[in-house]
DNA sequence: GCCGTTTGCGCAAACGATTGATCAGGCGTT
DNA sequence: AACGCCTGATCAATCGTTTGCGCAAACGGC
């Protein structure tokens, strides 16, 4: 409510003096006595800079938007926290939005960056969206950083998906498994491709011949994990272990195994790439490879800040910390 | 990018004419020919009203904030969708924030309503926060609607918690259970109190004597459910069924039962108040009483809009649709 | 005592949209 | 021909901040 002029009147100085003091303008020549009076007056009237006035003048809002496929999916919890923490550290506010609402021709982008509500966007595209079409709708409409996936003309940040899947697979191999299935995301999904590559690399390194029948591409949701598992278990020689490309899919894997009367981990071991708090509450609790998603969020927000400030397009990979195996109870040596 | 003056220049009219045409001002006297020219020009240059300019002049942003304890908890999924849908329907944008960040003396409120970033706030207080302290920090700082809980001076919206708990308890009674435990939220939590009251009412109506030993007040999180269950199962006469005051707590109930080797629903039935997609993926899938949380969100957003427009403080309860029992696999008749 | 420099501060013009007040013609009436 | 009135459109002030520039007063050097 209180504005600059209120503070100015109370301190007996001009509006511009107040502005300079409060924004800490170093080039301002004002006596320490005046500065003190201004600060005191500002405190007394409870001054808060008006967002609209400031945004109008500066042509920037210090708001960034994070758009994820599903705000309320626990998979995005760490990412969200990372983006928000980085935003706050930079004096920004984070606006969270669902990419669900993004479809009709980029109306959401118009509304956010087109109207100048936000300085830029961190976007995790929904799995299976066509990059071409997305690039079309997003256009060069404003500063953009994508997550997990590149888009022409925008910065991007990824995590070491291949390495994570590799660690997961290695864990199973170390336990003695030789027939290992892969419950992957959609075949078009870049993350799913990378994770599949890591899975394949681990097998190859262990001298295990690849078997395309053991690799499925159903998707990242719970029913997709179920379908993958049904497919794998119907094989003449079903796997003794499964690498699930994501926690939600892994929950589906567990459900399907249970439905078919298979004991986990006794008759089927399950390990998931990704980690989320839900993984500790499944039955049995899921062994996971934790990806640095919090750091992904921070990195993405930082990258966006640089783009907003006119920096060049960058493509980053978060290598630190490395994906780490979190052993719970869903993996065990295969039955003799 | 394009502004009013660009459109005006292209259409050969004044800025004010453009503003009036585009905002559909009925009191404007402009020929249809001019209107058409303006609309055409606006389309050609891709005009979008600048958010800051508009907000500055109108002293409103058409942004509302939804503050929940944990953005990424699936419990809040329906609520979030409800608030957002209502906001969008009213031409607003929703800003999602964590109430986690709310603590230090209301800095978050200052940042949101104090700086005029949002027109108002829909707030679900974190469980266990002191209403007095919260009221203090929120003050009359701006339009506010609270969820599940009243705060002096603010509108509020609730759901029929008592009725939901009652339906859950009745379900167990109908199955033949007589010793029914209650795994509640914190004793200070208004929702927990209402749900406990509904539980008690159902017992009384069935002529079952209340037993305070069967009622626990640990909290709404997963470990709280575990603790409640451990407490209940340690009783000389443990219950054959449990009403969990919330899905997360119910997950803990399931975990503890499993840990103690109790079959669900064979030896212990579990029903939860609340519903979320996670409830369908537990083992066994949870029988729940679904509360109208989506409608709660819509109602809250609508109430906030009225407060923003200068309406009076209201206290609403969402009675439609009624809480409904969703039968899954965690409940069964007690063993003889 | 004069001049150049520094210090301390205020003036006023933006930023983009909205809106009450105003103005120029055209037309009908007296 | 003088007058008022309606139509169609513009003028100009306003919202609250920021910032380049200007203007005094004080100060130091000669």
Image (cartoon, coloured by chain):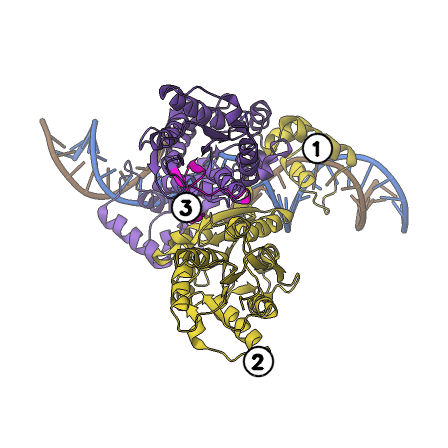
Chain colours: A purple, B yellow, C blue, D brown
In the picture of the structure, the residue carrying the numbered disc 1 is B39
> What's drawn in magenta, residue-wise?
A259-288
Residues tagged by mark 1 and mark 3 found on one chain of the structure: no
Q: Secondary structure at mark 1?
A: helix
- Residue B125 lies left or right of residue A230; in this view the side is left
Q: Residue A242: give x, y in percent of width and height.
A: 46, 33
Quarter of the picture containing the C terminus of chain A is top left
Tell me the element at label 2. loop
Q: Is residue C29 depicted above or below A227 in this figure?
A: below
Q: Nearer the viewer, mark 2 or mark 1?
A: 2
The chain identifier of the residue carrying mark 2 reads: B
Q: Which residue is mark 2?
A: B207
Q: Which chain letter matches label 3? A: A
Q: Are marks 2 and 3 on the same chain?
A: no
> How far, Cα to Cα, is label 2 from label 3?
40 Å
For the question of whether residue B319 can be seen, the reply is yes
Q: Which residue is mark 3?
A: A285
Query: How far apart are the two marked residues, 2 and 1, measured between alpha carbons?
Result: 71 Å
């Amino acid at each position: 409510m209180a504005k600059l002029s209120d503070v100015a009147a109370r301190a007996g100085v001009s509006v511009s003096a107040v502005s300079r003091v409060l924004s800490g303008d170093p080039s301002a020549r004002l006596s320490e006595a005046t500065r003190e009076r201004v600060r005191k007056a500002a405190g007394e009237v409870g001054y808060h800079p008006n967002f609209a006035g400031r945004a109008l003048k500066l042509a920037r809002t210090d708001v960034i938007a994070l758009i994820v496929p599903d705000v309320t999916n626990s998979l995005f919890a760490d990412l969200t926290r990372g983006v928000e923490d980085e935003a706050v550290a930079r004096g920004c506010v984070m606006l969270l939005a669902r990419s669900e609402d993004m479809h009709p021709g980029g109306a959401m982008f118009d509304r956010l960056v087109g109207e100048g509500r936000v300085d830029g966007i961190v976007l995790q595209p929904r799995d299976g969206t066509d990059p071409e079409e997305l690039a079309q709708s997003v256009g060069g409409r404003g500063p953009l950083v994508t997550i997990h996936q590149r888009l022409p003309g925008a910065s991007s940040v990824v995590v070491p998906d291949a390495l994570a899947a590799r660690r997961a697979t290695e864990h199973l191999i170390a336990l003695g498994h030789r027939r290992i299935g892969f419950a992957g995301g959609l075949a078009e999904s870049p993350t799913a491709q990378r994770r599949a590559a890591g899975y394949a690399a681990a097998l190859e390194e262990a001298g295990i011949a690849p078997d395309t029948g053991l690799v499925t591409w159903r998707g990242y949701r719970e029913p997709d994990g179920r379908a993958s598992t049904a497919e794998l278990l119907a094989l003449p020689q079903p796997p003794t272990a499964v690498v699930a490309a994501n926690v939600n899919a892994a929950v589906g894997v567990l459900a399907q195994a249970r439905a078919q009367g298979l004991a986990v981990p006794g008759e089927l071991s399950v390990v998931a790439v990704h980690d989320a708090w839900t993984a500790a509450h499944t039955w049995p609790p899921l062994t996971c490879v934790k990806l640095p998603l919090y750091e992904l969020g921070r990195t993405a927000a930082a990258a966006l800040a640089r783009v907003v400030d006119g920096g060049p397009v960058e493509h980053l990979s978060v290598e630190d910390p490395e994906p780490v195996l979190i052993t719970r109870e869903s993996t065990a040596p295969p039955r003799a």
